[in-house]
Image (spheres, rainbow, N blue to C red):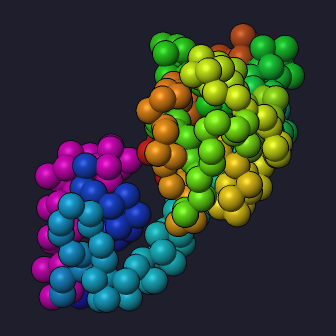
Amino acid sequence: MKLDVESLRALRTVVHAGTFTEAASHLGMTQSAVSWKIKRLEERVGLELVKRGAEIEATPDGRDLLIYAERIIEAHDEAVERLSRSDLEGVIRLGANEDLRGGALADVLARFGRMYPQIQLDVRVHLSGIVHEWLDDGHVDLAVVQIPTTHVEPDDVVLWTDHVIWAIGVDHEFDLTKPVPIVSFGQGLVYLDDAEEALSRSGIRWRTILECPMLSGVQAAVSAGLGVAAVHSRNLTEQMEVWQHNDRFPLPDISEVIRNGADGDDEVLNALKETLSDALVGVRT
């Protein structure tokens, strides 16, 4: 029995993405090609590896294989990166927001370091509004930031787009005849003005009860019932739900993009931009 690395990569991506369509987008392949790779892999091992349906899930045998697949893919990619490392030299100042959490950004930067050992990275993380200011002021050369989808520019690389919704803790509610407590990320949140304007237009009274620049802090506060927060739908936890009054206070769609600074168009910078794009398009951490 021989296991093909790219088939294992397809299996991992399909299970993580949940659908053949999203996996195909991330892998840069057609949906039929991804499906064919999974089918061939199942034929090769003689086992059913995924449960097909509205959302793809790994079978018990699939989960067992994924344990080895992760190690095989990691070893393969590290070897390829080591053998194909570049002699490019330079310094890149990268700004990124906190939303690329769960190790996704750290993993791709480590991979970039192995591929381009002569390039020095200077990475700074903050809320997207602050990172965007760094980019405009020339303090960073490249940024991974969230912006209103209507503000996406032709040269931006869009990683994902999502709805922003009002979230509340499960089994919690607030009396709209009284000031609604709001949990906020604070200054630097790209849709802060939109959120405040949406509340003000509705005519309800509101007050900021807690301000925290970290997603985990906002999630914890909302889950505990302290207040309502404007968050991406992808950032809902099991202890959070869409507020029943969400449609009264509509919020803009947000896109996560990679954006160059004013002088960000050289070989060194484009190498990082391409590496980030290849690894992070469609990532849902």
Q: Position of residue 174 (x, y in %)?
A: 63, 48
277 lies above or below 14: above
Q: 140 left or right of 164?
A: right
Q: Which of these two is toward me, 199 or 188?
A: 199
Identify the image quadrant of the C terminus.
bottom right
126 lies above or below 221: above
Identify the image quadrant of the N terminus.
bottom left
Q: Which of these two is toward me, 154 or 271?
A: 154
Q: Residue at x 46, y 83 (%)?
A: 67
Q: Position of residue 215 (x, y in %)?
A: 71, 50
Q: 80 left or right of 8?
A: right
168 lies above or below 95: below
Q: Residue at x 57, y 22 (%)?
A: 202
284 lies above or below 122: below
Q: Residue at x 73, y 42 (%)?
A: 181
Residue stretch in magenta? 22-46
Q: Residue at x 54, y 15 (%)?
A: 151
Q: Position of residue 98 (x, y in %)?
A: 72, 45
Picture quadrant where residue 2 is located? bottom left
Q: Position of residue 252 (x, y in %)?
A: 51, 25
For residue 180, say whether it is visible. Answer: yes
Q: 239 left or right of 266?
A: left
- Residue 35 falls inside the magenta stretch: yes
Q: Which of these two is toward me, 273 or 197?
A: 197
Q: Which of these two is toward me, 252 or 62?
A: 252
Picture quadrant where residue 136 is located? top right
For residue 255, say whether it is visible. Answer: no
- Residue 192 falls inside the magenta stretch: no
Q: 176 left or right of 32?
A: right
Q: Residue furthest front?
A: 177
